[in-house]
Each structure stands twice: as C-alpha cells, then as structure tokens.
Amino acid sequence: METIGDRLKEIRMHYSLTQKDFAKKIGVTNAHISRMEKGITIPSEHLIMLICKEFEINIDWLKQGEDPMYAAESIGEKMEASIPILNKLLQSENIIIQNQAAELNMLFSKIINVEHLNDDTKVLYLNNISNLLAIVNKFTDSIKEDISTGQQTLKEISEQKFSMYKNDLMNYVDELKRLFFLTTNQP
C-alpha cells in the first residue's frame, strides 16, 4: 500500500465496512473518510491512534506501511484471553458442558481449516467468518445479559432478538454479495 489513504481503505475493506460504518466506529463523518482515502486529507495523530486501537492495527503499518499490519501484542492477548475460557468449560464437573465445549471447539476448528486455499482466499474467507461470528457474538451477548438480569423470559428474548439478529445477518449477507461482486468484476 502506497499511501495512508490506501491503508485506511484496506482496513475498511478488510472489515467489510462502508465508509459510513467505518466513520461511525471512529467518530468522524463519512465525507472525512472519503477525503482521507483519496489522499485529500491526512488523518490527525489522534485519529491514527484511535483507528489503530479500534482495529488493533500496527501504527507503523498505518503511517508508513511497515509490516506487520496488525499489532503483534493484540494477537497474543486474544489467544491468552480465549484459551482459559475454553479450558474452564472443558474442566467443568458437568459432562454435558464438557462435551458441548469440545464439540464447539471441534466445529470452530473445522470452520477455520483453510489449508487448501491460497493466502489471498484465506484472508477473504477468514475475514468473512470473523464478521459473521461478530454478528453472532453481538446477538449472544445481548441474550446473555437479558437472561442474567432476569428482565425477560426466553420466549420474550427470542421473539425480539431473533428478529434483530435475522436483519443483521441478512444485511451482512447482502454486503458480502456486494463485496464478492466488486472483487470478481474488477478489471
């Protein structure tokens, strides 16, 4: 990537975000994003730091294009955070919980097994799986909170939340189709 604008666009496209959605995440207008991507405006130091924090990007990559793109410590932190959660479930005294945790771990491993794909396709595939799971996570976090506070019954939750969840998934599928169309129809 030659310019900071190119790298900003790469981040946005990697997360399958429109300029408007990207702008919302970092608290600027989509017109400002457009100007930065075109190289008309250069982001402030504060905005660069905000983008790097929000998307776990290596600041040297964003500013000068120096690899790696992602902050190395964020990868380690993600691994350190996820392993104890799985281990706790696998060590539960309840055999049903152990079995379900093992099954989910195996299912996830199968979903992300991309050994047979080339690197560009791996990146696109894994990015899309990540975005899809982010929608699932948003939905399940909301349900877990409602259940833990006892504010709603499971029936009430399912009627309200599944409708919102369906809309989020359909919007994601539509955006994914658009991105694949753009990718496959480039000269």
Image (spheres, rainbow, N blue to C red):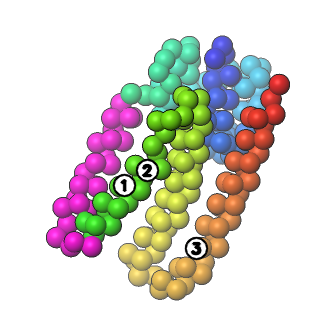
Position in image of residue 134 (x %, y %):
53, 53
Give the SS element for disc 1.
helix
Q: Are marks 2 and 3 in contact (CB under 8 Å)?
A: no
Write down the region rendered in magenta.
73-96
Position in image of residue 65 (x %, y %):
56, 15
Q: Is residue 94 magenta?
A: yes
**Left or right of 17: which side holds 137?**
left
The span from disc 1 to disc 3 (Cα, nearest Å) is 27 Å
Under mark 1, the amino acid is: Met
Residue density around tag 1, few if under 14, some if 14–19, many if 20 or more, within 10 Å: few
Point out which mark residue 82 bears: none
Residue hosting label 1: 106
Position in image of residue 32 (x %, y %):
74, 32
124 is higher (above) or lower (below) than 111: above
Point out which mark residue 110 bears: 2
Residue hosting label 3: 161
